[in-house]
Image (spheres, rainbow, N blue to C red):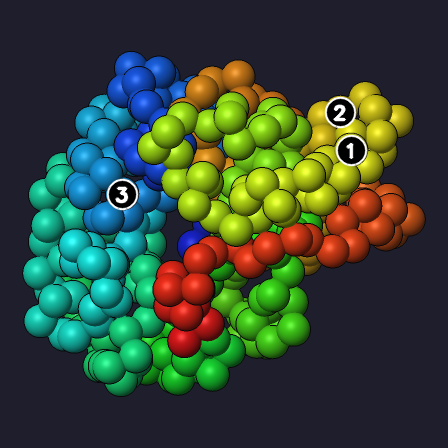
Amino acid sequence: MTLLGELQAGKQGLGCMGMSQSYGAGDDRESVATIHRALDLGVVLLDTADVYGVGANEELVGRAIKSRRDEVVLATKFGLADPDRRPRGDAGYVKQAVEDSLRRLDTDHIDLYYLHRVDPTVPIEETVGAMADLVTAGKVRHLGLSEASAATIRRAHAVHPISALQSEWSLWTRDIEAEVAPTCRELGIGIVPFSPLGRGFLTGRVTSVADLDDDDMRRGLPRFAEENFARNTAIVTALRELAAERGVTAGQLALAWVHHQGEHVVPIPGTKRVKYLEENVAAADLELSADDLRAIEDAAPAVAGDRYPAEFLKLSNQ
C-alpha cells in the first residue's frame, strides 16, 4: 500500500467527478458498477468533492459504498461550492461544509478532507485550524490541500500535518515539479495527481473536439481549442508508437509515467466505465526503466495552450 502521510491509500485511486459532471452525460448504474469493480480490484481511494454535480457526486459515491464503507479510503473536498466557484476557507464555512458532505455521503467520517482551492482572503492557518478541529471531533481522519503553492503547504503543515496534496500532474502538466513536489517530499506529504491522463487526451480516444458532448467542459479548455488540438495530437502519436512496442495503450504508458514519479504518489485517473477502470489499474504494474522514462518525456516536449482558462488558472498555486 502506498502511503499518503500515514494514510494507506493503495497504488492508485479513482476520480469520480466525471460520473456526475464535466465529461458528458453520466449513467449512475454504470458508475456504481465502476466503483464496485474498483474496490474488487483493490482500488480503495475514491475521490469526490462537494462541488461535483452540485452535491450529486457525493450522494452517488455514498450510495455506492454504503455496504462496503470499511473497504474505502473516502476523500472529498470543500471550498469551491459557491455558485461562482469563489474559493472559501473561513472557519465557519469549514464547519458547515463538512456537515453537508457527511450527510450527502451518508457516513460518520471522511478519511481524507481537502481544501479544494486556497482562499486568498483567509489566512491558511485559520482554514487548516478549523479543519484540524474536525480531526479532533472524529469527523475527519486526515487533511489535504489541492493546487496549493509550496509556501502555503509549509504554513498549513505547521498548523496540522497535511497528508496529501492533490494537484494536476501528467506528461502535459508538470508545473508542480519545480517547487511543490520537492516540498511535499521534504515534509513527508503524499501527492495525489488528478487528470494524470491529460483529461483523457493522452489516451488518444478524443480525436477531435467534435467527439465531445456539447456540455463537455473540455470544449472550454485552451488545450482542446482547435488551434492547439492538432499540435497536441502529435504527443499522442508519439506515445502510441512507444506503447505499441510494449503491447500497451498510450494511456497506460502515460499513466505508468506518473506512477514512476517517486514514492507516495497515488494518481486518481477518473472514469465512469468499468473497461477504462480496468485498463488504468493495469498501468499501475507497468515497469519502466530510466531509458523508458526519458523516451516518454521526449514524446511530450511541449504542450500547446494553458490547462485552464485564465480566470480559473489564477485560483491555482495560491
Q: Amino acid at mark 3?
A: Tyr
Q: Earlier in the sequence, mark 3 or mark 2?
A: 3
Which mark's residue is nearer the viewer, 3 or 1? 1
Which mark's residue is nearer the viewer, 2 or 1? 1
Image point 37% across, 43% down: which residue? 47
Residues at circles 3 and 1 in contact by the CB criterion of under 8 Å: no
Q: Earlier in the sequence, mark 3 or mark 1?
A: 3
Q: Amino acid at mark 2?
A: Val
Rendering coords of residue 44 (x, y %)? 42, 36
For the question of whether residue 31 can be seen, the reply is yes
Q: What is the spatial separation of the Cα atoms under label 3 and label 1, in whole angstroms?
A: 32 Å
Q: Which residue is mark 3?
A: 52
Q: Earlier in the sequence, mark 2 or mark 1?
A: 1
Q: Amino acid at mark 1?
A: Thr
Rendering coords of residue 303 (x, y %)? 68, 53
* Disc 3, SS: helix
Vertical comparison of 41 with 17: above or below? above
* Disc 2, SS: loop
Badge 2 density bin: few <14, some 14–19, many ≥20, Cα 10 Å: some
- Using the rendered view, name the quadrant where residue 180 is placed: bottom right
Q: Name the quarter where the C terminus is drawn.
A: bottom left
* Disc 1, SS: helix
Rendering coords of residue 92 (x, y %)? 9, 71
Q: Which residue is mark 2?
A: 248
In the foreground, 211 or 153: 211
Relative to 210, is 279 on the left or the right? right
Q: What is the spatial separation of the Cα atoms under label 2 and label 1, in whole angstroms?
A: 14 Å
- Using the rendered view, name the quadrant where residue 186 is placed: bottom right
Badge 3 density bin: few <14, some 14–19, many ≥20, Cα 10 Å: many
Q: Which residue is mark 1?
A: 237
Image point 44% across, 58% down: which residue? 309
Badge 1 density bin: few <14, some 14–19, many ≥20, Cα 10 Å: some
